[in-house]
Amino acid sequence: MNLLSESPEETQRLGKELGRLAQPGDLFLLVGGLGTGKTCLTQGIAWGLGIEGYATSPSFVVINQYRGRLPLYHIDLYRLDSIAEVIELGLDDYLYGSGVCVVEWAEKALKTLPTEYLLVELNFLSDTSRNLVLKPSGERYVEMLSQLKRETKRTKKTNVSDVTL
């Protein structure tokens, strides 16, 4: 599914929809360069889970935890240099637990992460515009995107430019 976001607020609204659809054990893998909106999307996911305030990037602490309808584990792998460092973190309790995990810079650890997830590629288009490519891996995430597609068409909250499931 390809989506166009024309502002940080639109990216947050998309995240909020994903957070509303989230279930225990869900995993969102975020990939994109600096400033492409990974943390904006995570803020929206947090709001969709009923978490108040802003989720902040855990670049220096690696993991932030938030309490909402479901626990949110916001993991940022930006400062890690090797798969060995990722393995040393011992993320299994988070990744296979009953909360929702969002992993920024997920490309650094794809080989060590579960095989079912929603991958979100965020691409810079302009100062305010981003292209988001959502790629499901596993039936759970195919269904999530079907629900998201129905919701975005019904409410027109997000600019759906193309849909491929």
Image: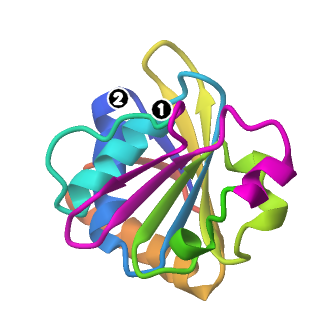
Identity of the residue drawn at 32% across and 63% down: 19
Identity of the residue drawn at 28% across and 46% down: 13
Q: Farthest residue in the top direction?
A: 127
Q: Is residue 78 magenta?
A: yes
Q: Position of residue 123 (x, y in %)?
A: 62, 32
Range covered by the magenta-colored residues: 59-88
Asked if 156 appears above or below 114 in the picture, the reply is above
Examine the rendering and report whether any part of residue 152 can be seen.
no
Q: Is 70 or 124 nearer to us in this picture? A: 70
Q: Is 73 or 119 nearer to us in this picture? A: 73
As helix, strand or loop, the secondary structure at mark 2 comes to helix
As helix, strand or loop, the secondary structure at mark 1 comes to loop
Q: Position of residue 55 (x, y in %)?
A: 31, 41
Identity of the residue drawn at 39% across and 81% down: 24
Q: Which amino acid type is marked by label 1?
A: Gly
Examine the rendering and report whether any part of residue 145 can be seen.
yes
Q: Which residue is mark 2?
A: 8
Identity of the residue drawn at 62% across and 65% down: 91
Label 2–label 1 contact, CB within 8 A: yes
Earlier-in-chain disc, 2 versus 1: 2
Please tell me the numbered disc located at residue 37. 1
Please tell me the numbered disc located at residue 6. none
Q: Is residue 83 magenta?
A: yes
Asked if 12 appears above or below 154 in the picture, the reply is above
Q: Is residue 25 left or right of residue 47?
A: right
Neighbourhood count class around disc 1 (C-alpha, 10 Å): few under 14, some 14–19, many 20 upward: many
Q: Is 147 or 91 nearer to us in this picture? A: 91
Q: Position of residue 151 (x, y in %)?
A: 29, 67
Q: Which amino acid type is marked by label 2?
A: Pro
